[in-house]
Image: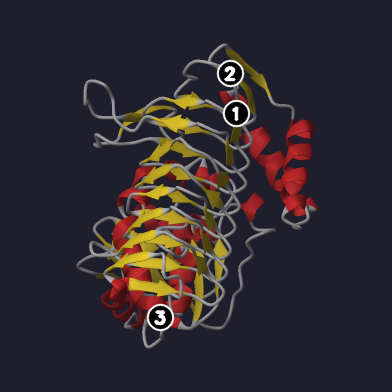
Amino acid sequence: MNIILFDDPTIRPNLLPLTFTRPVADLRVGILTIAEKWSMHLGASVSYLTADYLQQKYSTHFDTSNFYINGAVCPDEDLIAAIQALKVGEALYFEQTLVAINGDNLELHAIEDMIAHGSSKRQSCDNCTRILEVWDIFLQNGEQIRCDFALLTKDRKSQPLHDRHTIVYGEENIFIEEGATIRAAVLNAENGPIYIGKNAHIHEGALIRGPFALCEESHVNMGGKMRGDVTIGPFCKVGGEVSVSVIMSYSNKGHDGFLGNSVIGQWCNLGADTNTSNLKNNYAEVKVWNYAKRGFKATGQQFCGLIMGDHSKCSINTMFNTGTVVGVSANIFGAGFPLTFIPSFSWGGAAGFEDFKLQKAMEVAEKVMERRKIPFSETEKALLTDVYEQTQQNRIW
């Protein structure tokens, strides 16, 4: 069974800026990315059918028999059974969303046609979990942690918790991978599971409430307060107070400050005492910048904090207003509240912005990745160059 995860063109623009640098299925929701969920459920490798400029990094593997699955859909057992029951040429829909196709070597434009006009060989499913908007990532995160926890820990035994100074509630809902360390922390898994990844570290005085996931080689720093529905992706360092948020991977929020109802991409850094507002003073519905609409869109949510694209940074004491969207490779600093929409490759803050020149942004990216011993490859350079050109229209100062 060859699995190809495709980007739905009616969904991907609503997930920008996070999908400027990755296919939809490479988004992390819960413990795993959507692609990792499908791979583990089906016991098979997956590939991507995405925008042309992303294909060099995220390639497509075709076989004689291919199942195309919408990269914005999270798997469950009922949905997998419905997909596996599809005959060649049949398509599975949930409401108006094309979920899956059992097909031959389809190009993205053929799938787009089926999305726009439907299929004559249409099957329907009763339910599925979709990530349709950026805020769905943190809204669905707690439930997806529960699902991924069950998947990852089935028929496995947790490493023992040896530290006698750590206090544990709901120990049966805690799973610790090999090489992880926990020192003088409080872990409360009564309301949801806690997953501690391989070689991850929870430092002294940390307070952790489930659902919570700390992925491979990540750290919760001393005194960190993780308030639930939180995922810290691989190779991150996090401190301060975090609630209902996802940090993708290779990003740091190492110091005090509040992050709530937020999604942070890869290779980001939040300076000391950075704070996000996730609730308006008048308790009104939050609106956020939407790239597809090219304007602000109502979220239907009272709580929504910061959405930050890959490679963006902010300095100490940065204050983000409710529902702020920051693009790719932005550098934010200075006193006061910056704009609630900060375009990609912006340099500045509340006092004003200018272009963050592409060459300078690449120099920063190379230094940051070098610290983690990951090369800033020609593929990465080409990807950022394409994003810079795509987003030029937003940089109007």
Q: Secondary structure at mark 1?
A: loop
**Residue at image coords 46%, 75%:** 162
Nearer to us in this view, 84 or 41:
41
Q: Residues within 10 Å of mark 2 (few under 14, many from 20)?
A: some
Using residue 392 as the reference point, say whether residue 246 is left or right of it: left
Mark 1: which amino acid?
Answer: Ser
Q: The residue under label 3 is which amino acid type?
A: Val
Percent position (x, y) of residue 239? 49, 45
Picture disc at residue 315: 1
Q: Nearer the viewer, residue 160 or 22?
A: 160
Disc marking residue 88: 3
Helix, strand or loop for disc 2 = loop
- Farthest residue to the bottom: give it: 155
* Residue for badge 2: 334
Extreme residue toward the front, this view: 164
**Camera sees residue 118:** no
Q: Residues within 10 Å of mark 1 (few under 14, many from 20)?
A: some
The Cα–Cα distance between marks 2 and 1, rounded to whole angstroms, is 7 Å
First in sequence: mark 2 or mark 1?
Answer: 1
Q: How far across and how far down the image is residue 217, in percent?
A: 58, 63
Decide: is 148 above or below 297.
below
Q: Are marks 2 and 1 in contact (CB under 8 Å)?
A: yes
Residue 240 x %, y %: 45, 42
Quadrant where the C terminus sits is top right
